[in-house]
């Protein structure tokens, strides 16, 4: 990764070193991030909340590129929840504008870096200009095979589960599915069908909640929290989270081999 002038900084060489270290251990296939703290970041600087969201776009760019460089398969970002409509209309409208701006600005970077964008949630309820931008990015990045960037938009975990139940019931009623259901078959009805479950879930800004994010999929995710606000989040923080992940022992309810498992 290079800065905008194309020269290598100390942060760049630190990142190269961290990357090489991280590659020696097991990396998560799927990292999910609740991008939080934009409002507080702006408030601390006496700026409008939207300035925090705008600064958050820069963090997205860094983290997406870092995940692609590391060979992580899936990165899911929580960009707009079903509950975020409760915010003032001006902030909601500003977030929608930022989404379109992000797509227009990042299209070449995403497509050029082999990043495929997938949307989960209910994008069909977003303003038409946002839906058009999402269609553009989906089309342009469809061939990407390096990193899958999943953006949760107008997404809520409970709604996703209810939607999945509805789809399943409809399939049973119309003879397309057998009433016998198991976890594996149910997961295929979720928005995340076909994706591995998140191995590592990161929430910046010091909040220790799941906030209706990937409720089903995060059943065995490792959680990593940091007080750093999202607009300040950089690959060095991702590297800290990944190094911590590599020290964890994931047992999925069983035992380690050394303990007789
Ligand atoms: C939470 O911070 C952040 C959001 C609700 C929006 C995140 C969206 C972006 C970074 C930009 C658009 C996204 C994409 C993918 C282009 P907060 O406002 O709740 O912060 P606070 O808790 O400090 O108030």
Image (cartoon, rainbow, N blue to C red):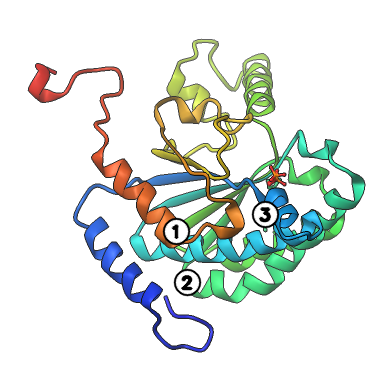
Q: Earlier in the sequence, mark 2 or mark 1?
A: 2
Seen at 19% across and 56% down, the residue is 24
For label 3, the SS is helix
Question: Quick check: 179 above or below 33?
Answer: above
CA gap, disc 3 and disc 2 = 29 Å
Query: In the image, is residue 85 above or below residue 22?
Result: above
- Tell me the mark number nearer the camera, choosing from 3 and 1: 3
Q: How far apart are marks 2 and 1 (CA)?
A: 9 Å
Residue carrying label 3: 41
Q: Which mark is residue 113?
A: 2
Indicate if the residue with disc 3 has its beta carbon within 8 Å of ligand 1: yes
Q: How crowded is mark 2: few (under 14 residues within 10 Å), some or many (20 or more)?
A: some
Residue 222 position (above or below residue 71): above
> Residue 200's quadrant in the figure?
top left
Q: Counting other residues with Cα less than 10 Å from the Cα at mark 1, is it few (<14), some (14-19), or many (20 or more)?
A: many
Quadrant where the image shows the N terminus: bottom left
């Amino acid at each position: 990764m290079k800065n905008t002038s194309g020269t290598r900084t100390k942060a760049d060489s630190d990142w190269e070193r961290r990357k090489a270290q991280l590659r020696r251990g097991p990396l998560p296939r799927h990292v999910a991030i609740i991008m939080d703290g934009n409002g507080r970041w702006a408030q601390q600087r006496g700026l409008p909340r939207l300035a925090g969201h705008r600064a958050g776009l820069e963090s997205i760019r860094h983290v997406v590129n870092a995940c692609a460089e590391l060979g992580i398969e899936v990165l899911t970002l929580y960009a707009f929840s079903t509950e975020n409509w409760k915010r003032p209309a001006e902030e909601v409208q500003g977030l929608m504008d930022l989404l379109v701006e992000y797509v227009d600005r990042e299209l070449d970077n995403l497509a050029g870096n082999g990043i495929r964008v997938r949307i989960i949630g209910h994008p069909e309820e977003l303003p038409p200009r946002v839906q058009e931008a999402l269609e553009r990015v989906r089309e342009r990045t469809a061939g990407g095979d390096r990193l899958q960037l999943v953006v949760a938009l107008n997404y809520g975990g409970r709604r996703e589960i209810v939607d999945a139940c509805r789809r399943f019931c409809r399939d049973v009623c119309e003879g397309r599915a057998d009433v016998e259901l198991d976890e594996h078959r149910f997961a295929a009805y979720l928005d995340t069908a076909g994706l591995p479950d998140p191995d590592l879930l990161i929430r910046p800004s010091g909040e220790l909640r799941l906030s209706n994010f990937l409720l089903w999929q995060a059943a065995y995710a490792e959680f990593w929290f940091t007080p750093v606000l999202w607009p300040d989040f950089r690959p060095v923080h991702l590297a800290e989270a990944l190094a911590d992940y590599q020290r964890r022992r994931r047992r999925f309810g069983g035992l380690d081999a050394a303990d007789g498992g």
